Amino acid sequence: MNTTIGTSSPTITAGAGRLLFERFMGRYEHGQIEPLLELFSPEAEIVTFEGTSRGHRAIGEWFTQCLATEGPSVLVSTDHFAEDGDVVRYEATMVSLDGVVRQVYGVLTVGDGHILAYLPGVIANQNGRSF
């Protein structure tokens, strides 16, 4: 049985979602919370297995905790990227300043030039350390 989910094909061009993704990664690399928050809608949310962070204050606290735990990370490569309307999906390889290499993924919904929702995760830790 062949089932098709969705009606449109993801694009690989540098659309608005791709540019927002690149700004997001660039700001994460610098480890500064305020510039990151500028990319998020005031009502945005981050959804993780640990819970949901809603609004700039909670999102700022979430990023502060991530950066305290992992430190800033540098984008090594964008391994997969798809932009389909207001949804951006990516897989990327990142390395922290102390050399921890991680394969990560994310799904963002975007609108009016801002991130409305973000679902982040780690696929694999290449150094064998647990998070």
Image (cartoon, grey):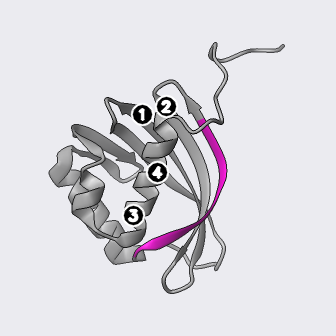
Dot 4 falls on a residue whose secondary structure is strand
Task: Assess disc 3: are there few (<14), some (14-19) or many (≥20) residues with their C-alpha within 10 Å of its C-alpha.
Answer: many
Image mark for residue 76: none
Q: Which residue is mark 2?
A: 87
N-terminal label among 3 and 4: 3
Residue position for label 4: 120
N-terminal-most mark, 1 or 3: 3
**Residue, disc 1:** 109
Q: Mark 1 or mark 2, which has the lower sequence index? A: 2
Position of 46 compared to 12: left or right? left
Estimate the x, y position of residue 92 in percent, counting from the top left.
61, 57
Q: Which residues are magenta?
A: 72-82
Q: Which residue type does callout 4 highlight?
A: Pro
Q: Specify the quadrant of the image occupied by residue 10.
A: top right
Is 46 rendered above or below residue 16? Answer: below
Distance of mark 1 from mark 2, alpha carbons? 5 Å
Does residue 102 show up magenta in the picture?
no
For numbered disc 1, what is the local secondary structure?
strand
Give amino acid for label 3. Answer: Tyr
Q: CA distance from mark 1 to mark 4?
A: 12 Å
Q: Earlier in the sequence, mark 1 or mark 4?
A: 1
Q: Nearer the viewer, mark 1 or mark 4?
A: 1
Rounded to the nearest angstrom, the CA distance separating label 1 from label 3 is 18 Å
Q: Residue at x 64, y 30 (%)?
A: 11
Dot 2 lies on which element?
strand
In space, the residues marked 4 and 2 are separated at their CA atoms by 13 Å
In the image, which disc is placed on residue 28?
3
Where in the figure is residue 40, as x and y percent of width and height?
Answer: 28, 44
Q: Is residue 131 left or right of residue 66?
A: right
